[in-house]
Image (cartoon, rainbow, N blue to C red):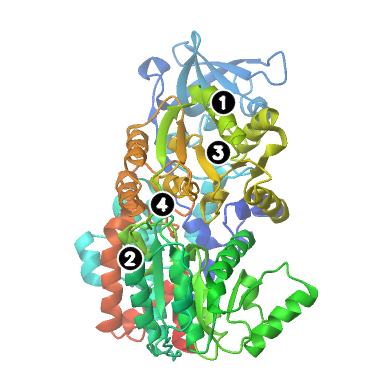
Amino acid sequence: MRPDILNPLFAETETLDGVGPKLKKPLDRLGLTRVRDLDYHLPERFVTRRAVQNVDDAGEGEQIVVKLSVTEHRSGRSPRAPYRVLAQDGIGNVIALTYFGRASYNAKKQLPVGETRWVAGKLERFGDMLQIVHPDHVVEEDGETLQRLCEPVYRLSEGLTQPKIAGLVDQSLSRTPELPEWIDSSQVNKEDWPTWRDALVLAHKGENAPARDRLAYDELLANSLALMLVRADNRKRKGQPLQGNGTYRGKLALPFPLTGAQRRSIAEIEGDMAQEAPMLRLLQGDVGAGKTIVALEAMLIAVEAGAQAALLAPTEILARQHYESLRRMAEPTGARVALLTGRDKGKAREATLMGLLDGSIDLVVGTHAIFQDAVSYRNLAMVVIDEQHRFGVGQRLMLASKGRRAPHVLAMTATPIPRTLTLAQYGELDVSKLDELPPGRQAIDTVVMGQARIGALVDRLAAQIAEGRQAYWVCPMVREMDGPEEIAAAEARYAALKERFGDDVVMVHGQLGAELKDAAMERFARGDAKLLVATTVIEVGVDVPNATLMVIEQAERFGLAQLHQLRGRVGRGSEKSFCVLLHGETLSETAQKRLALMRESQDGFFLAEEDLRLRGGGELLGTRQSGDTPFAVASLEQITELLPKAYDDARLLMERDGGLEGKRGEAARVLLYLFERDFGVKTLRGG
């Protein structure tokens, strides 16, 4: 049960003044459904303004507060033209306050001719006139704009304004109780950190590094504790010791001999599976390092020991691909492999369910459908989870209930993860690494070119297609952004390429329905379509050996790890493959380094560490990259610096301070519930 002290924090946002159905929608879009979420909706940056007597005292581009008298309103000739309000400062300088679109309605009300107002915003020049576009604040003469010299800037969604969200945050903070201290006192004193509640208040007020670090540390400590509890619980559980005799594995027909890294990983897995405590191991493989073969060997150990194994994939397409390749490789062994997804209906589904129940099916591959209540196994003792980061710890615990005893779990990811992040995301797992490529995998030639050469690139693409090859074209965003940046959206690029290549082009992005997405992917996988235009949906796992060209548009917008993942979609067949990184006109220093590293290296583990180093430098790409970190508060930089300390602190609490039982343990329970890592507490109760 959640401790009562947290109830005010988990109250719905509707309990705040002024939040009705209309405001609830944009709040929900930002994930702000409870008081706690608003507390943790920390500002992205702060605007610092200077109060000036007149605009002669201010520099162009500066954020200012100035007193102005309104002289005239001018509307444009067309509805799309800007609406301008002319005003004068104390010594007669004329300034235009410029509004676009609907914002002009407010201007008419807020700025009556002849009145004086305090105006806050950024001073700019347009032609020969000074202007402030969309002032941040317009306040009557005796108002309090001058108090707003340092102001937080929050992430918004349509229907919210900065003042609105700032007001809601203030309300939330006023309802936030003091909580007991869960961090070891020596750590608090050493870092000179404020209490939890003070840290929240300070983080919304200004750029306060100690307050932000304290809040990040809380999150990292909650995560480390929860993972330790899950791990300790796993050690107490009884699994099924599984020892194979090699009868099935000896008959495997593998496309090439195992690498040293594969042999080492299989030996580690074999050792874990022979124990009574269920295995919890993460298999990290670089793109194309042969994880599937290692997974198959592990699953066959279970079959040799008279048990069943299952492979869980995040999407239907991946489940089908895994099924095809496992069935092909396992055919000579005589192991029976089945596929079970949400799509299967009728007699075929019944037959699969019967086979799992009576044990005539040895290996099953599928999506979440393989763990539905209706699915029962004769003896499920081994589970492989592909693309581990898409499944939470809670789901992994659910799997544990499917076997007679807790099954052995092998989690796989094709994303090489820097060491510190491995600890953060997978602190409860042992780790095996596949850091060698199988013989026969060719290096992929990586070319960096400017957007201006796109015409020549499309001609090259046409030649590839004429030779019967296939290609990917990846774009960073789905729709054109509002604003001056022309972001080459997938839809616009698709339309342009379709004019040239007709039905040979298909498109996939995150806003397409699952059926449409699957149909497009299947056309491409079968070879009916030659070019796939996509957002990063295709990052993980798609296997089309005939695809030999990968184009990544606006490559400077992606992190190194993501670029490496995308590049790994080609180079899977015997033909030479290429990756083209297209970039915009201006490149930051970090972006230049990133693209240069991509040209120089194909080692995913090296690139992952470099990526963390480059981005840890503070240049997180304005928008958080998908899968960047598993945390809402802690940045990459904070994870690198604070996670090892938080991990040690959690270990101290568990080993020296009596776990969750002592005084600090009580506070730690509050922390686990605050960050909704209470699955850690549940293992204590249910384990």
- State the image coordinates of residue 487 (x, y, percent, origin top left): 56, 32
Mark pair 2, 3: CA separation? 34 Å
Mark pair 1, 2: CA separation? 41 Å
Q: Is residue 10 left or right of residue 78?
A: left
Q: Circle 2 sits in a helix, a strand or a loop, which is it?
A: helix
Q: Nearer the viewer, mark 2 or mark 3?
A: 2
Q: Amino acid at mark 3?
A: Cys
Taking depth in this image into account, of 441 and 541 the one nearest to the observer is: 441
Give the residue at mark 3.
Answer: 475
Q: Amino acid at mark 1?
A: Asp
- State the image coordinates of residue 34 (x, y, percent, origin top left): 57, 62
Q: Nearer the viewer, mark 3 or mark 1?
A: 1
Q: Nearer the viewer, mark 4 or mark 3?
A: 4
Image quadrant of residue 310?
bottom right
Residue reaching furthest top? 128
Mark pair 1, 4: CA separation? 27 Å
Mark pair 3, 1: CA separation? 19 Å
Q: Amino acid at mark 4?
A: Arg
**Relative to residue 383, is residue 520 depicted above or below?**
above
- State the image coordinates of residue 567 (x, y, percent, origin top left): 46, 45
Give the residue at mark 2.
Answer: 261
**Is disc 3 in contact with disc 1, using a CB cutoff of under 8 Å?**
no
Residue 441's label in the rendered image is 4
Image quadrant of residue 583?
top left
Q: Earlier in the sequence, mark 1 or mark 4?
A: 4
Q: Callout 2: 10 Å neighbours few (<14), some, many (20+)?
A: many
- State the image coordinates of residue 343 (x, y, percent, origin top left): 73, 67
Q: Callout 1: 10 Å neighbours few (<14), some, many (20+)?
A: few
